[in-house]
Structure formats: C-alpha cells, structure tokens
Amino acid sequence: MNEVYLEVLRPGINTTIQDKGRFHLYHIGITVSGAMDQSKFQISNALVNNDYNEGVLEFAYQGPCLKLVNGNINIAITGNVNFNILRKNSTTEEGICFKNYFLEDGDQIDIISTKNSVFGYFAVQGGFKTDKVWNSLSINTKAKVGPNNGEKFSLRQKIYINKSKTEKLLEKKIDYNFLNENIIRVIKGTNYNYFSESALNIFFKEEYTVSNLSDRMGMRLEGPKLENITNTNIKSEGLVKGVIQVPADGKPIIMFSDHGTIGGYPKIAVIISADLDKVAQLPPGSKIKFEEVSLINAENYFKDHIKNINKYIREIK
Amino acid sequence: MIKNISNLGDASIYCDFGQDVNQKINSNVVSYFNHIKKLVKNNKIKGITNITPSYNKLIVSFDLEIITYNEVKQIIENSKIKKNIIQNPKKIKIPICCDQEYALDLTSLSNKLNISENEILETHLNKEYFCYMTGFIAGMPFLGDIDKKLRTHRLETPRVKVPKGSVGITEQFCNIYTYESPGGWNIIGNTPKNIFNKLNFDKPLLINPGDKVSFYKITKQEYLNWNE
C-alpha cells in the first residue's frame, strides 16, 4: 500500500513539527520546545478531530508549499495566515483560517505568509507519521533533537501522514478573532531589585520594540537601556519560558520555547502564562508595553485564557 | 537548607539555597531535586513539568492547569529531606588534547594570568572536579572548582561557535561543550570523547551531577584515532 505524504515544494522559512512540548529534561539541558502559540496549536488539532497534543506543522512568516500524494486528508490552518489551495484541476481557492479543508490526491496547499503575526499552524487529521523523541514530537533545530533528526523541513522532503479514517470533509469551522495585543503582563522577576528605580520606571512606562534578532529561542527588544545597580551577572541558574533577562547591555531578552536551560543574566520580570501566546505572535518592529500584575491575578488571567480556548474547542465539537 | 521560596512567574517555584557555591549547598539542592523527582515518579504530586537544579537554586516548573504555586510551595515546605543521601558518584576520566589548534585561548590565558601555558595545563590536569549541574545545552557539565590561580572572567566577546568537545574554564568552573555552540569560556583543549549521546535515551549523559571528573592529556595522534 502506498503511504500518504506531503511533498515539500517550498519549505518556508522555519517549518517544523511541534506539539505541547518536551518535559522533564531541563536538568540535562534539553529545553521544552513545543508550539510557540499554544492556543492556535490546540485549536488546529481540534479542527481536524485530533487529540489535543498531536504534532502539527508550525511555520513562521513564509510557510511551506505542500503537495498531497497518495491519499485524501482533512487539514486546517490556524493563526492569521494567507494561503491558497491549488486543486488538481487547476482551480485555486483562497484559504480561510480556523476552517477545515478536504485535500485530495494531487492537491497543493500554498501557505504564502503570516499576516501581522509570526507563527501559524497546519494540522492534518490523524497526525504525522513519526516517532516521538523523548516523549515529544517537537523539533528543536538548535539542539538537533526531535523528529526529522531535529532539522527543519527542506525542499523535496516527504512528510508522511498517518492514514486517517475519514474520507470526507469534516465541516468544522469557528470565527476566531485574531488580535495583536501589545500590552504584555508580567510578574516581578527574582532579580527585580538589581535594577535602579529609574530603570524599573522605564521598564513599565516606556515602549520596547521587537528586534529582528527574534526566533524560537528568544526575542530581543530594543529600547531604553535598563541600569543595573547590583551585578550584571548572577551565578548560572535555571530558566523558564517567559523569563525576561537583562544582560550587561541593558536590553531585555525574552526566553521562548527553545531557550537554553541555564542562564546567568539577571531576571527583571517573567511574562504571565496567559500572555505567552500573544507575545510570541508580535513580529519585529512591533511595540511592547509591560504591565505588572500580582501572582493571584496572573493565575486568574490564566483561568480566563483557558476558558476562552475551551469555548472555541467546544464550538468546534 | 532552603533560605527562601518565591515564585518565578506564575508557573515556576524558585528555591534559593543562598549565594555561596560549594559542594555542600549543591548536594542539598540535588537532595531536593531527587526528592521531588521521586514524588513525581510515585504520583504523589501532579502537574510538575520540570525540575532544574543549579549551583545553589532549584526551580520547579508546573502546569498551571493542574497545580498552582501555593500548592507546590506547601509540598516543598512539608518535605522532610534526608541529609547526606548516599549517592554513588562515578569517577570519570576525560582525555583531552591541548595542542595549539584545540587550546584556542591557552596563549592569551597565559598572558592574562601571567603563568606559563605548561603550568596552566598541569594545574588543571592535577585536580579532580565535582559536577555541580548539567545544562545550558544538552549534557554540558558544569565542573568545579578549578585552582585559584587559574580563575578568570569569560571572554569579552563570546565566540559565535565553540567547537564540539572544547574544554573551557571561567571563574571557579570548567565545562565541556557537548556540541558546537556559541560560548564565552576560555578554551584550553578538546576531548574526542562523546559526552552527550542523544540516541541513548536512558543514559544520554556521560557526566551527571555529583560525579567526579578528572582530565588526562593525549597526543594529537591519539585524539585523531580516538574510537569509542
């Protein structure tokens, strides 16, 4: 029997498989990885009837162009994405996000770009045919860990798909209001008092700009320098996603999914869990303003965030 | 043993064992690490996603959908940790070639410290080191303490690429780059030995926290012919 696969006609800038993440390995230096925008990842799986933690393709800026070979599948794209479906009979359909499509043998999907955002997700019903590495399907291209030898996908590769049971369109869609929000809520970091009063004032009052030096490891920000009055180094210690470190140059760096597990720069603040998805979606040039919240409020905002995702998932079902 | 517990964001707990770096404090950190790991394994605590020990801190991360800071804090505060948990440290000998092409910073280090290259190497080879922690990149061991006369800062401008196998020193510590990576440590040699094996899922690390590590010199010929 011929295996179903997607042939990569154009790989896109950074196309990888991601799931929720790879856990319990920080202590040996293997980071969490996982989808940068967890809510869009979860919803993409729900749209094609997958388990919530099935692996999906994550792409950044320019996505891949893929051709389906040897089968028919349901797919869905989430995020804020420009894409077309090129049917085998030469008709082109303009794609709509948060809606599933039925692709037939020979059809192509051309993911042109993300719009005013960074990451998009492409889920196929049944998931991709690949083994978990250390209990996760996430690809970490820096450490070369994960499926596809830890590499992003390249031209002419075949991405194999598990045979799915459904042979017709699932007809699922939601109206998702994709908004870019620039106010990012944080909790004080463990080295908050390393910084001068004026630095802390600047941090919460001024705008920062997302620089080009941003990827799955982290996001560097441009803006007023933050004065450290204690020590620009700390003894190396653990890091987590969302930590904002400030090295000697005084410019904040946000740790993302593929961050190093240990670091030695002071932690001024940590982004609350409810805002991690939205900060990840801010493209270079975007403005960011930080707002301090308490732990209890952060926990409540996270509950609201989960409720909101679950509302969409219920709508799909 | 833990001096202070606080939150690192809303989904991690930060246990502070103080500012000093020594084996005793680090052993306390590792005892807590082992204790929480056991609770996770025996399903006594749910929702823990990572436990990260370092020199004198322990960070426990959790899934905020399952458990919250105050619940984790209570479990840690109520934990009775047996001191001096018997560990079985492995003794590991690492071959290292210190020819000029591998010892990238030996000459500049000799100038900076004002001691001869030979003395730097002999001092370094003449000591057994303790593995405090692993991380930053997969399997990188943080070893200490190096002799006082070898202690110096990181490079002013870090290298974009440090070759795999490089052995570096900075401050009181020594490490081994398990694969090519950016880095700012002073490189004094290179080992052909594989320190991290990503295909060995059960035991990917050659050197684990608590292990004792020493180095011995090999020639370039031995380096090139190294076969595991």
Image (spheres, coloured by chain):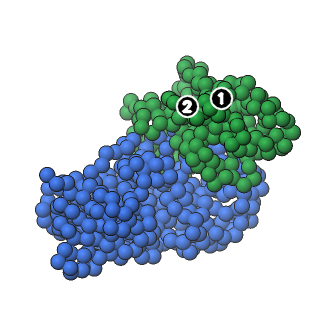
Chain colours: A blue, B green
Q: Which type of secondary structure does the marked residue at label 1 adopt?
A: loop
Residue B218: mark in rendering: 1
Q: Nearer the viewer, residue A296 or B147?
A: B147
Residue B226: mark in rendering: 2
Q: Residue furthest right?
A: B114
Name the residue rendered at 14%, 59% in the picture. A166
Kind of residue at disc 1: Ile
When asked about the image quadrant of residue B225, the answer is top right
Quarter occupied by the C terminus of chain A: bottom left
Name the residue rendered at 46%, 45% in the picture. B62
Mark 2 neighbour density, 10 Å: few (under 14) some (14–19) many (20 or more): few
- Left or right for B60, reference B161: left
Name the residue rendered at 49%, 44% in the picture. A30
Mark 1 neighbour density, 10 Å: few (under 14) some (14–19) many (20 or more): some
- Left or right for A127, reference B21: left
Kind of residue at disc 2: Trp
User: CB atoms at circles 2 and 1 under 8 Å apart?
Assistant: yes
- Rounded to the nearest angstrom, the CA distance separating label 2 from label 1 is 10 Å
Q: Position of residue B81 (x, y in %)?
A: 54, 26
Q: Residue furthest front?
A: B221
Q: Is residue A119 visible?
A: no
Q: Nearer the viewer, residue A42 or A128?
A: A128
Q: Nearer the viewer, residue B189 or A80?
A: B189
Given the image, what chain letter belongs to the residue carrying mark 1? Answer: B
Q: Position of residue A63 (x, y in %)?
A: 38, 69
| Whether marks 2 and 1 lie on the same chain | yes
Given the image, what chain letter belongs to the residue carrying mark 2? Answer: B
Q: Is residue A13 above or below residue A141?
A: below
Q: Which type of secondary structure does the marked residue at label 2 adopt?
A: loop
Could you tell which of marks 2 and 1 lies nearer the N-terminus? 1
Name the residue rendered at 55%, 56% in the picture. A255
Q: Position of residue A115 (x, y in %)?
A: 42, 76
